[in-house]
Image: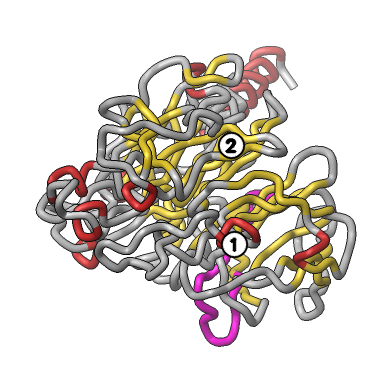
Amino acid sequence: MPMQTTSKVLLMSVIAMTSIASSVFAGGPGKPGASVVKPDADNAGLKLPAGFGALKVADGLGRTRHIAVAGNGSIYIKLDRAKNNNGILFLQDNNGDGRVDKQTAFGNYGGTGIYLKGDYLYATSNTAIYRYKVDAQQQVTDPEHPETVVSGLIDRRQHESKSIVLDDAGNIYVNVGAYSNSCQTQDRTAGSMGMQPCPVLDSAAGIWQFRADKLNQVYGDGVRYATGLRNVVGLDWNKSQQQLFVMQHGRDQLHDLFPALYSEKQSADLPAECMFAVKQGSDCGWPYIYYDQYQQKKMLAPEYGGDGKKTGGENAEDPVVAFPAHMAPNGLLFYTGTQFPEKYRNGAFIAFHGSWNRYPEEQAGYYVVFVPFKNGKPSGKWEVFADGFAGKGPIKNPGDAAHRPCGLAQGPDGSLYVTDDAKGTVYRIVYNAK
């Protein structure tokens, strides 16, 4: 072959390889953290920071709660209610366009929690934690026969969902929500005072720790790791700090229950939804106190003699971050990927499911926010990262919201996945995709 022809062939090969790299790494050659996929033309209806795009991975799946993404990009999703007698979805993208083209299902129970770590997929009902063995591709090998890790978790039809996360030392953490709003003698009854001490704390309103490698544990085998948490749906293990972080749903109905002490406006705006960094033995103060994000103080709850002015909980944990009231933080994820810009590294994403009780104000939330972190602590103010899930407002009732964010997961390429349990949509957010 003539020298000139050989050079031309080599040049064409280089161009072809460069083209392949550009298509595989959407940010261009040399950016191995970037995504393969192309965003939807309208970014799936989301409002995102400059440089970000989004697509709908799947739609109409059911009440999709938490999500786990395997190393090959396959997706596991927990359904709040079993659909066609299946409560776990396994979604695959076989043609590489970022959208699901194969769906299978298993697990005949509803629930919220799902987590993939090591050789197992862990999933929860509202009363138990199960695990499934996975192969080298992190695909479940025997979906019909899960092993029971823990059984007998409390479900009293209020704050009953069970979210889970694992640490790096073989422990699994599960929330057990309070079967009460504020531990009144008569729950959600105007003027009813709080029980002292609150008996709910003995078996609920906290985080319990179990061994992930021990089967057939019962509720009593667990360690009450943290207490004083009314309801936690979003939680994550911060790997850089080796510490558990949780998002608490704050209490409701300050005005309805104590109209002489709180106006409707105050009840709509208080108390804060709080992020806590917890360790074994942490007490976050529920039901005796709540956090006022305006005064930046822990306040004595009216059920225990508070009046909106008295502080309390001197020995209770201070929140790491305080957010507006009643927005229902259902997902928490510390971002460890490299696809997003440096400012997002080790920071926290929170999915807010949206409020139901901010009357006479419009309902709020229905978005994903970001909190920058440095050395395990917030290093700046929180900001709205992804908005537009709810659609056109005003949102007077939660049923007016088109979509409601719930679960968060990080893909192997650094994409951010968000579930919606109103329409069963799964979103994927990417950076610099073309």
Q: Amino acid at mark 2?
A: Phe
Say left or right for 364 vs 241: left
Query: In this picture, is 375 found above or below 371?
Result: above
According to the picture, the residue beneath numbered tag 2 turns out to be 245
Residue type (three-letter) at the residue carrying disc 1 = Lys
Residue at disc 2, secondary structure: strand
Q: Which residues are magenta?
A: 70-88
Classed neighbour count for the residue bearing mark 2: other residues with Cα under 10 Å, few (<14), some (14–19), many (≥20): many
| Residue that mark 1 sits on | 162
Where residue 366 appears, x then y in whole percent? 30, 50
Q: CA distance from mark 2 to mark 1?
A: 16 Å
The first of marks 2 and 1 along the sequence is 1
Q: Is residue 95 visible?
A: no
- Magenta stretch secondary structure, dominant: strand
**Residue drawn at 68 percent across, 24 percent down:** 240
Res 252 quadrant in image: bottom left
Residue 56 seen: yes
In the image, residue 48 sits, relative to residue 176, either above or below, namely above
Q: Which residue is pictured at 23% across the width and 48% down the height?
A: 364
Q: Is residue 81 magenta?
A: yes
Q: How many marks?
A: 2
Q: Secondary structure at mark 1?
A: loop
